[in-house]
Image: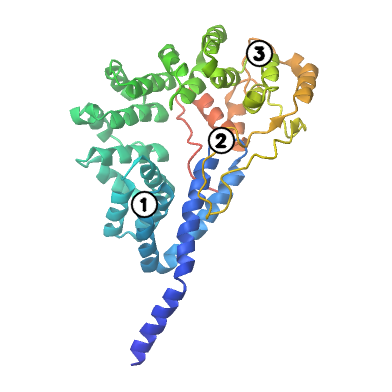
Amino acid sequence: MKLLDAFRAKKKTTEAFRDVYEQHVTDASFLWVLRSIGLNQPHYFSADIVDLERRIDANLDGLMNSLDISWEICLEALSFEQPGEVFTAAVVAFRSRDVEKIKAVMLAGLANEATIKGLTSAMGWLPGNLVHGWVQKFLGSKDLIHKYLAVAVCSVRRENPGDILTSLLQREDCIAHKKLRSRLLRFIGELKLHNFQWALDEAYDDDDPEVKFWVNWSTVLLGDHSAVDQLQDYVETSGPLQRLAIQTAFRVLPVATARQWISRLAADPEQARAVIQATGVLGDPHPVPWLIEKMRKMETAKIAAEAFVMITGISLERYELTIDGPDEITVVPNDDPNDDNVSLDEDENLPFPDVDKVAYTWQKHGGKYLAGNRYFMGSAINPQTLHTKIKDGSQRQRQAAALQLALIEPETMLINTREKIVV
């Protein structure tokens, strides 16, 4: 009787705390979404990412205090087929070392493009001893989407899987699977795997646009900058690869050639934003007065100001060169897990420039910048400057610095500025 009473008391206590574990799942999932968005934002710095990561870890640790009830809630959350919930469930499953739990989260995580991101993130977040065995298992799986996941995880962790990579790049089924082949070719550039240049050469004539992009992008990353010419179509075409094409091409093109590309891009009125982005990436101070004029138009004010900062390094906030934005703008996503609105305007968190003050500042200090030279955040481009920005810059600045560093040092792998920050 005493044992039965004790069991009932324990069950009642567990049920009483169920809402606590539900909150842990909700908060961990939402904070992961907030972090994934923040990784690309101009107002997030490493300290902000670390703060989010600590809060995520605190919720994940809380879930491990009662694994049975936590897993039950995780399973319910997986039915939403959302990346944040998959991330949370995956961390719990792998930390439990329970094969059935891991199989369940794998099934849910491979449901769609979004959930794969959550699953990949979780396997990058966890310590290697919990995921390495599974990565090897997936690399050897007959299911090509398992292989894709494994390569994506290796990419996030910046880990070379070894000899099996050769097999994957040669197998006919892997070559025919364009999504997997693209990911493999991208991986070669990210990790600077020069011994796999042959795979890029073999894929050169592939007709798939995404495959062709990663062939040329990785070739440029490996140090053959002549391949940048093959990125021009991607620079001029709106789509998911345009931004990276711009970020890459205008860091390696000769200044005179880059100006020609920008002029050609400017002939299309629909590419106004791309023209401004390319100008900032190039780093040539010659068009700064033009950027200042673009700041006078509401639709291009913020992005033109960002390009100005990328060239000159003059912080609008530090030197009080900003004005308040329109009152009707609502900042999203906020820190409320009950708010489902996680969409975000690309320019949402960029400051509005005080154009007259910016113009005066440029008039006063612009003489020290030489037209035709390249600058990154106001400094000559060199490894020391770039390492400093990777450490201290905003997320967008860190990403730009990491790519620039990889482009000027062919042996240095592309630093992953999205990985979990170890402090």
Q: Determine whether the residue tagged by mark 3 lies in a helix, strand or loop.
A: loop
**Which residue occupies the foreground of this view, 315 or 21?**
21
Residue at x-position 26% and y-position 28%: 169
Residue that lies at the very extreme toward the front in this rendered image: 328
Mark 1 vs mark 3: give the one in front.
3
* Disc 3 packing (10 Å; few <14; some 14–19; many ≥20): some
Work out whether residue 173 can be spotted.
yes
Are the residues tagged 1 and 2 within 8 Å (C-beta)? no
Mark 3 vs mark 2: give the one in front.
2
Q: Which residue is mark 2?
A: 345
Q: Determine whether the residue tagged by mark 2 lies in a helix, strand or loop.
A: loop
Can you tell which mark lies on residue 51? Answer: none
Locate residue 341 relative to residue 117 in the image: left or right. Answer: right
Residue at x-position 49% and y-position 25%: 243
Rendered position, 404 above or below 317 = above
Residue 322, how many percent across, how many down? 74, 32
**Which residue occupies the foreground of this view, 86 or 227?**
86
Amino acid type of disc 3? Pro
Residue at x-position 29% and y-position 22%: 199
CA–CA distance between discs 3 and 2? 26 Å
Q: Earlier in the sequence, mark 1 or mark 2?
A: 1
Q: Determine whether the residue tagged by mark 1 lies in a helix, strand or loop.
A: helix
Amino acid type of disc 2? Asp
Can you tell which mark lies on residue 129? Answer: 1
Q: Earlier in the sequence, mark 3 or mark 2?
A: 3
Can you tell which mark lies on residue 287? Answer: 3
